[in-house]
Image: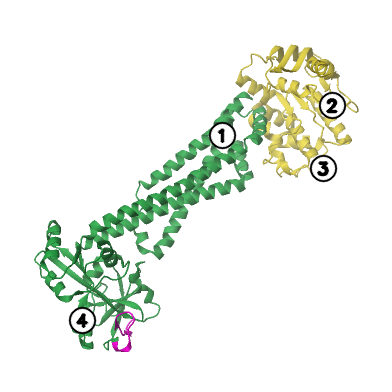
Amino acid sequence: MVIMKIMRRSLGQRAGRTTISILALAFSIALLLVISHIHEAVRSYARQVSSGADLIVGAPSQPAHLVLYSLFRIGPPPPVISWDLYEAIAGLKDVEWAAPVSTNESHLGYTVTGSTARYMETLQLKVLNFIGNGSGTEFRNHRSAFIGARLAGDYQPGETLKIANGFSPSSKDEYQTPVIIQGVLMETGTSLDSNILIPIEGLRKIRKAHGIKTDHLNFILIKLRHRHSLFKVQKELKSTFNTPLEVVIPALELEKLGHYQRMLNNVFMAMSFIIGLLSLMMMYFNLSAGFAERKQEVELLRMVGVSPWQLAVLTLAEPMLQILFALCSGVVLYKVSTLFLGSWIPVVSSIALPFEQLLWLLSLFLLGFLVACLPAWRIYGFSRRT
Amino acid sequence: MTNVQAVAIHELEQSIGETEFLRIPELVIDAGETVCLQGGNGSGKTTLLRTLMGLVRYNSGDLMVLGNDMRKIGTSSLERLRADSIGFIFQHYRLVPYLSAFDNILLPCYFSAKRRYEAERKSETAAKDAIRLIRKLSLTDPSRLSKNAAQYSAGQQQRFAIARALIGKPEMVLADEPASAMDCKGKKAVYQLLQDECRASGATLICTTHDENGIDGFDRYVNMDTLNQARERENRWSL
């Protein structure tokens, strides 16, 4: 009982230094977990999205660029390809479905994406419908539009939008047929949040009404009937058409990119682990620096009958309590951070942290235990001699 | 009065390397006796008290404390001897700075059932016994003992250390300059309290001081400069 009191008061006396050590350790633990969480979330999201489409076809460009733009809207849009190509690809017997995507139109600087419900499903886009009672991603008619979450504040459902050809359009580039807002896309955390999605068939009609004869698009997502024909179809698509094409397997490209992501992740993990180690060292130096002043305390406690074991436990319990408290605070900090991150980047909140990540915590705890054992052992030795 | 020996020293020598700290041919202190060890700085007063406590190991000779041969005593027996039977007042009081003054005084009762039992026997509870002792040490408001020990003045801290040594009726009280931080009036009160308490409980009191005047009431005064021959030799060398 009194031992607990001594421990509590002793910790309280060193509150300033103790708090800094605890904060540093808690921060490094939270950082470790958050980095692992983001890494896992991005990996799982990329895996899910890339599994929706087997192939992506576009004009010749860097394969990584084509994948990043078509799935995550990272980078500039790839050069256009003709609509005929889409029709030819969609007609192949190995192709289950093909989703054409065009991103050549805009509305007041916002990209207008023309595509199909398939594309939205592949990207796992969810919508909030305002018109009609549908809850899916189906467009109600050819003039319907879904607006990205970032546009939701400025536009009302049922409002009409005029779109234009290109991104710096003159007045003659503006299409006369407007689109009507059907619903809002749920936040994705990508630049799709500032996109306007319209049906590609509707877009083609609007273009025709404006006098544009040739239809074009930027890329096509393809789902095959059988995945084992992947390389065969890839080769076929590259060789069959007169136009040179880039045909990429998104899962493969993302795997290559994943290698760099893992490297980056490991660097961050190592950094936060080093912060953890430094805070443990700080804890150790705090304990060691107080050793001289504690010698007198130990001598007195020995005089009144405290045993060497009690004193060793006392010395061990102090840093262990600090480490435990830091671990708990770190986990709480991590949970709060992911909540915050989840509202900012929705994909981040969608995963549970794998169990292996807890090994990092366990190793930090064990290291902390070793660090705490050293002064406890010294105090034990000194007490035995007193 | 029985002539049981509380402390018996014969040819005691204590040194570290070439430096000799103690060389006491003979010293016997009877149980219940109050003894004042007087001597200048470096005369070996503190070393002798620490040797009696078993804090310092001696090299040769015989030392018996409360019937225990200090050469043969085991670690756990020494632990119990100190906790149950000896009250010690350090020169610099040595209170646990983050515990309250009250907890500091009660510390021996927390770890020794014997001391707690004796304190309760004297004043119903150990806490009441602590207050009784504090009142005797001229502290005006004994109820204000909840502050951390480090927040009190040096004189007050020394009083707490004295109360800690006396609580629970130890068989022997070793006091190393117990009134060094006090004024003349405080000093007299401290020596008087130590003597009264020890005499009332039949405890042996061994007190050290470098003051030569105004220390009254002890049964015996021992001059450490004469008793400890190690210092004489050291002085001769330095000449």
Subunit of label 1? A
> How crowded is the residue under tag 1: few (<14 C-alpha within 10 Å), some, or many (20+)?
many
State the CA–CA distance, disc 3 to disc 1.
Answer: 41 Å
State the CA–CA distance, disc 1 to disc 2.
Answer: 38 Å
What element does badge 4 sit on? Answer: helix
The amino acid type, in three-letter code, at marker 1 is Pro
Residue range of the region highlighted in magenta in the rendering: A157-172
Report the residue marked by disc 3.
Answer: B140
Subunit of label 2? B
Report the residue marked by disc 1.
Answer: A375
What element does badge 1 sit on? Answer: helix
State if disc 2 and disc 1 touch (CB < 8 Å).
no
Q: Is residue B39 left or right of residue A334?
A: right
Q: Which mark is residue B210?
A: 2
Q: Is residue B132 visible?
A: no
In the picture, one chain is yellow; tell me its letter.
B
